[in-house]
Image: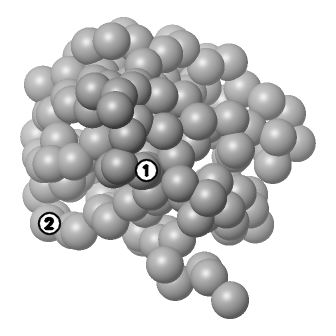
Amino acid sequence: MRRLILLRHAKSVWDTPDADHGRTLSPRGERDAGRVADRLRNLGWVPDGVRSSDAARTRQTWEHMAGRFDAEPPVEFQAFLYLAGPHEVSKVLAQTSAETETLMLIGHNPGWEDSVAYLSGEATTLKTCSAALLEAQRDSWPELAEPSSWRLVDVVRAKELRT
């Protein structure tokens, strides 16, 4: 069985002179990233590989999550995942190592919502710092790059974890 976590970056600031790519996390986004990581760990959804957009807010989202897992998985930040959608997600899946069981992809909307719909056939809303949890029974990552290859198991939403 394979697992895929499509995580939308945490809440970022808007009042910044930086271009969109350089926007950083807000204090709420920093807190939410840790909460979501804790929830994923408690659910047993621990990534053993991470691929992320190279935007500042996705990098920071991962920085606030990484230490919450028992072992920090290898992470790759890639420019082509900035504002990516189903095509780019499929490309990543097709290139994922057979040793990876649970892959986390960190990115942006609307591409992540589109990717969930493409991969699972189910529409969902991914607000900031929401993680769509998908499972597939096949063992070959390249086979899992196809439409409707996955089952949407759950969505972890930071908003629902705030106390």
Residue 38 in the image, given as x and y percentages of width and height = 74, 62
Q: What residue is rendered at 40% in x and 12% in y?
A: 78
Q: Is residue 92 left or right of residue 75?
A: left
Q: Is residue 30 visible?
A: yes
> Which of the two residues, 100 or 162, is positioned nearer the viewer here?
162
Q: What residue is rendered at 41% in x and 69% in y?
A: 155
Amino acid type indicated by mark 2 = Ala
Q: What residue is rendered at 35% in x and 49% in y?
A: 15
Pointer 2: residues within 10 angstroms few (<14), some, or many (20+)? few
> Which of the two residues, 6 or 138, is positioned nearer the viewer here?
6
Residue 150 in the image, given as x and y percentages of width and height = 28, 49
Query: In this picture, is 20 found above or below 118?
Result: above
Q: Is residue 131 visible?
A: no
- Res 79 → quadrant: top left
- Res 82 → quadrant: top left
Q: Secondary structure at mark 1?
A: loop
**Total number of numbered labels?**
2
Residue bearing mark 2? 123
Query: In this picture, is 52 found above or below 114?
Result: above
The label on residue 12 is 1
